[in-house]
Image (spheres, rainbow, N blue to C red):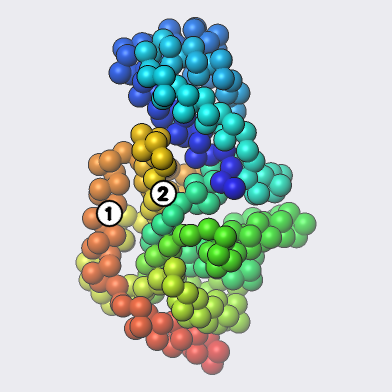
Amino acid sequence: MTGSAVPRRMLGRELKKLREQSGVSAVVAAEAIEVSPQTLWRMESGQQGPKLKELYIKVLCEMYSAPADLTEALVGLIAETKKPGWWHSFADAVPADTDMFIGLEEAASRLTTFQLALIPGLLQTPDYRRAVHWIEFPSRPTTEIEPLIELHSRRVASLTDGWRSVQLEALVCESALRNQIGGPGVMEEQLIHLADVVAAQNISIRIVPQQVTGNLGLITGSFVLMEFPARSNTRLSEPPVVYVQGYTGALYLDQESEIKQYRQAIGQIKRVALDEKRSRSLLLDVAREYQA
């Protein structure tokens, strides 16, 4: 179950496209369904909050002269927006921006992540993840941290339990292997875990060694490119999204020019990264350093 994030984005994106193509202003469209322009903006941007009603969609589609089959498809998305994802049971512990990210992550068929300083989230061990949370929230009680660890474990399980098909390609700077998160014991376990999971057919891990020159990732910073399976109605398929996490918020980039630029960056980073075999050897070498 992917939750409401993706269908909300699909519905909002198509409503905005129809409105702009028809030449109807946001103010006029908002008045037609008796909501504020701000609420309409939230609907069109696929954000949580606004209540989506079948009547709203039908009124707007009629105003925009949308084809009957497209109107029917958009109305059908409303039911999907109301389906909670499994992670909604952790609502008290999950910030709103994280809810959006997990929803997109769960719906993706391919994830390409580049990380400068930390191990990619879906490849972190529980102890490593716990140490990251303690760094970020040093004053939080354990009772608030442990639900986050359980949530993370559920996300990780989706990679290997076989209930959905997803490919993960991780490009990781060597500095992430050497930043001591949680101490030597935690790091040794983490790196051995990485060396083990590369055996999975749907996971690829490649390390960018510190001594290389021309690593464009130093400019881009860490990011995740999420790609999604096609829907039967290709017009409603979710386009690729680049997620860029910041200390005070996150960016979701989905413009075609932005995606193209990040794809080019991935290509350049791959050119300076070690292949999978040499990456695994480096992981084990650094793990032995921690053991010593």
Q: Residue at point 41% right, 40% down? A: 232
User: On the picture, is 163 further left or further right than 225?
Assistant: right
Residue, disc 1: 263
Q: Amino acid at mark 1?
A: Arg
Crowding around mark 1 (Cα neighbors within 10 Å: few <14, some 14 to 19, many 20+) is: some
Q: Position of residue 193 (x, y in %)?
A: 54, 78
Q: Position of residue 64 (x, y in %)?
A: 38, 13
Residue, disc 2: 229
Q: Residue at point 70% right, 48% down? A: 90
Say if 23 sits above or below 215 in the image: above
**Front residue of 92 and 131:** 92
Q: Of discs 1 and 2, which sits in the foreground?
A: 2
Q: Amino acid at mark 2?
A: Pro
| Residue 205 visible in the displayed image | yes
**Front residue of 253 and 145:** 253
- CB-based contact (under 8 Å), mark 1 and mark 2: no
Crowding around mark 2 (Cα neighbors within 10 Å: few <14, some 14 to 19, many 20+) is: some
Say if 18 sits above or below 266 in the image: above
Q: Residue at point 46% right, 86% down? A: 284
User: On the picture, is 269 further left or further right than 229?
Assistant: left
Q: Between disc 1 and disc 2, whose residue precedes?
A: 2
Task: Choose top left, top right, bottom left or bottom right for residue 29.
Answer: top left
Say if 287 sits above or below 8 in the image: below
Q: Position of residue 34 (x, y in %)?
A: 55, 8
Q: Position of residue 112 (x, y in %)?
A: 39, 59
Say if 207 sits above or below 151 in the image: below
Circle 1: element type: helix
Which residue is situated farthest in the right direction here?
Answer: 143
